[in-house]
Image (cartoon, rainbow, N blue to C red):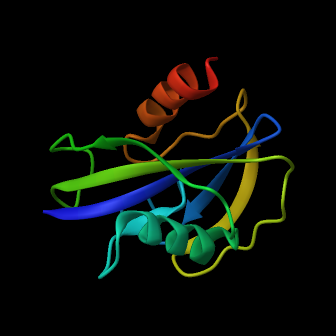
Amino acid sequence: MEVAVDCVIVAEGRIALIKRKNEPFKDCYAFPGGFVEDEDLKSAAARELKEETGLTDITLKQFKAYGAPDRDPRGRVITIVFSGELNSIQELESATDAKEAQWFALDDLPPLAFDHKKILKEFLEEVIRI
């Protein structure tokens, strides 16, 4: 079993997504995130966010954990989702295993990898109240 973190970052009715460089879901969009290393969960989320989007100094709040056995085709992966809100759109810079990073309007999203559509739906209902 692996533990991962994912980041739901919103600004001005948009969400930051990355295009995955690697399988599974190569070339699909997903939340910035990845596996936890020898660090606490919030530090892992901040590291992955910086690595995949260039975003730093964002106040991250733990949202929920997701652990359906089939949420990741590589095996059992539990993800802890963190959220952050920016006052304005900031430039994104993709790196590491993100092919690109960009902002998408919340009402015009591409198909999402893993269970990220479900996570985003719950986030919008419970946090943004859409």
- Residue plotted at (61% across, 60% down): 18
Q: Where does the image place residue 108, in percent across and percent down from the top left?
A: 72, 31
- Residue plotted at (63% across, 53% down): 17
Q: Quadrant of residue 13?
A: top right
The quadrant of the image that shows the N terminus is: bottom left
Q: Is residue 23 visible?
A: no
Q: Where does the image place residue 129, in percent across and percent down from the top left?
A: 61, 18
Camera-side residue of 124 and 104: 124
Q: Tell me: 68 left or right of 102.
A: left
Q: Where does the image place residue 128, in percent across and percent down from the top left?
A: 63, 26
Camera-side residue of 35 and 23: 35
Camera-side residue of 99 and 11: 11
The quadrant of the image that shows the C terminus is: top right
Q: Is residue 35 visible?
A: yes
- Residue plotted at (66% across, 68% down): 53
Q: How many labels does the image show?
A: 0
Q: Quadrant of residue 102?
A: bottom right
Camera-side residue of 111 and 54: 54
Q: Tell me: 96 left or right of 53.
A: left
- Residue plotted at (54% across, 68% down): 46
Q: Where does the image place residue 117, in percent across and percent down from the top left?
A: 47, 34
Q: Tell me: 42 left or right of 87.
A: left
Q: Tell me: 115 left or right of 15.
A: left
Q: Is residue 36 above or below residue 1?
A: below
